[in-house]
Image (cartoon, rainbow, N blue to C red):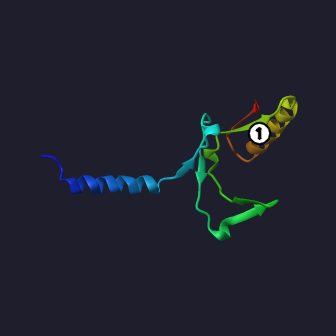
Amino acid sequence: MSAPPINNLIEFLMMEMDIMAKVICLKEQKWSEEREWRKVFELKKDEIHYHEGKPYMKYYLDKDLLTGITVFYENGGSAEAQEDAGKIEKYLLERGYNAKVRTEMFVR
């Protein structure tokens, strides 16, 4: 005997509500090949901070969640990028992070 249609509707609505309650992530087409997601938050007015006119939100992640950083450079900037990556890696190690820092050429 199959479930009555109302039970199917209730299950469907519960599934929809669960999906809506999950983290919302956005991916623009140009970033579709990246293996990362961008977390989207609904900001309250008192949570918005500004640096040089650009809004941002202070959001802290557990150290174990940071697994890697990529320093991008344009043609000819490899040495500077390697130097920056070294400084970042040293900074992270001193603070107990276990994240790999790598460099990659940025191609437009």
Q: Nearer the viewer, residue 13 or 97?
A: 13
* Residue at the farthest left position: 1
Say which quarter of the image contains residue 64: top right
Judge from the rendering whether residue 108 lies leftward or rightward of residue 61; answer left or right: right
Give coordinates of residue 74: x percent, y percent: 82, 33
Secondary element type, mark 1: helix
Residue at coordinates 82% horizontally, 59% vertically from top-left? 52
9 above or below 92?
below
Give coordinates of residue 39: x percent, y percent: 59, 51
Say which quarter of the image contains residue 98: top right
Q: Nearer the viewer, residue 66 or 19?
A: 19
**Disc 1: CA contacts within 10 A as few (<14), some (14-19) or many (>=20):** many
Give coordinates of residue 17: x percent, y percent: 40, 57
Dot 1 amino acid type: Glu
Image quarter where the C terminus lies is: top right
Judge from the rendering whether residue 78 lies leftward or rightward of residue 93; answer left or right: right
